[in-house]
Image: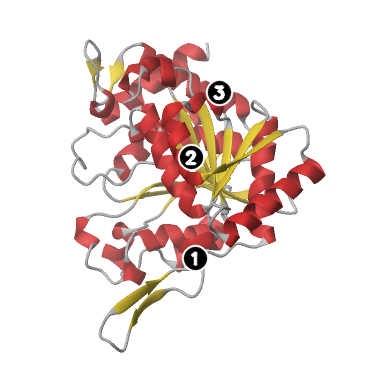
Amino acid sequence: MSSNRKILMLPGDGIGPEVMKETKRVIDWFDKRLEVGFDIEEGLVGGASFDKFKTPITDEVMEKALNSDGVLFGAVGGPDYDNLPFSEKPERGLLKLRKELGLFANLRPAIVFDALADASSLKKEIVSGLDIMILRELTGGIYFGEPRGIEDLSDGTRVGINTEVYSTKEIRRAGEVAFELASKRRGLVHSVEKSNVMESGLLWREEIQKLHDENYNSITLEHMFADNCAMQLVRDPHQFDVIVTTNLFGDILSDISAQLTGSLGMLPSASLGEVNEYGIRKSLFEPVHGSAPDISGQGKANPIAMILSFSMMLRYSLDRNDDADLVEKAVTKALEDGLRTADIMQPGKTLISTEKMGVEICNRLDQLSV
C-alpha cells in the first residue's frame, strides 16, 4: 500500500471486545511482518457508548466512521439494555451507522470448512464444500418503510403497522452488486422474493430481470420465492451460488444458511455502500454472531468470524485479495490442526480459548508467509 489505511474499530458489547482484540492481533501481524500499514482508531458503540454518553453512538464516532476506509464492528446489546427506550437501544447505533454510511448491500458468506463439515446439523454429504453468498438489501424494505408504528384504536385495541417499500434504484443497485459477485464466482444468481403475494416482490422480480437482460446476460439468473428458498437451503444448498434478496427475507435466509455451517461463530459479513468518485465504497464488517452476554469475559468466544470479517475488509474494501486469501488459509490450517473453541468443539480435538485461537492463527500466518 502506498499509504496507511484508516480503520475504525468498534468492539461494542458482550464478547465484541474479546473477538476484536484477536482481530487486532492479526492486523498487528500484517503491520509488523508484511509492512502493510493501518492507522487504527477505536470508539464506543451500543451499550458501551450508552453507559458513558447516554447514546448508542456519538457524533464524534459517527464522524470517524465517515472518514475511515472501513469499519470493523464487534457486537452490541445485552439484557442490561432491554428496558431502554427504542431510540436508545444499543442496536440503534448499528442502524445509524448503516444509514449514515449508506450501506445498502449486506454480504453474508456461508462457507463450510472441510474440518467442520461434521459440525453442521445436516448430513456431511449435503454441506461438505458449501460456499454460498447471500446479498441482503440493507436500507430499504419493511424495516424502514413508512408508515410504521403502533396505534391505539377507538375500541381500546391496538394495531401494529410496518410497510414494505422498494424503489427501482434500491433494487437495481443491490442487483448490480449480486451480478458482479457472481461474475467472480460460479456465474449464478438466485433472486428471491414473494412476487406471488406482494407487489413490492413483483417489482423486485421485474427490475432484477430487466437489469440482467440489459447488462448481465452472461450470468445465469433464476427467480425463487422466499419460502421455497428456505426449504431448498436445507434440502440442496449446493444449488446456490449468489442469493440476492430483500431486507426481511435476507435477515431470515442468512440465519438459515448460518446453521448449515455449524456455528454462528464462524460467519463474517460485509456491508457495502456505493462507489464514490474515488472508487472507494463506505463499508462495515462484522461477525454474524451477537454479543453473547452469557459467555462474555470467559474466554470462550470464537474469534474466527471477526477475523474473517477483517479478511472481507481486505478483499472488498482495501483491494488486498492476496492478504485476504492468507488470512483464510491461516484459519483453515488452524482448524485442520484440530484447534477448536467451545462452540465448534468436536471429539478428539483440542479445546482452546479465544486468545489462544488468535495466537494460533497468527502462528499459521507465520508458517504460510515463509
Q: In the image, what residue type sits under mark 3? A: Asp
Query: Mark 1 sits on what residue?
Result: 144
Residues 119 and 93: in front is: 119
Pointer 3 local density, CA inside 10 Å: few below 14, some 14–19, many at least 20: some
Mark with earlier residue (1, 2): 1
- In the figure, 180 relative to 206: above or below? above
Instruction: Point out the residue furthest to the front here.
Output: 196
Left or right: residue 311 compared with residue 207: left
- In the figure, 90 relative to 344: above or below? below
Query: Mark 2 sits on what residue?
Result: 228
Q: CA distance from mark 1 to mark 2?
A: 25 Å
Q: Which mark is residue 325?
A: 3
Q: In the image, what residue type sits under mark 2? A: Asn
Judging from the image, what secondary structure is the residue with disc 3 in?
helix
Q: In the image, what residue type sits under mark 1? A: Phe
Quadrant in which the N terminus appears? top right
Mark with earlier residue (3, 1): 1
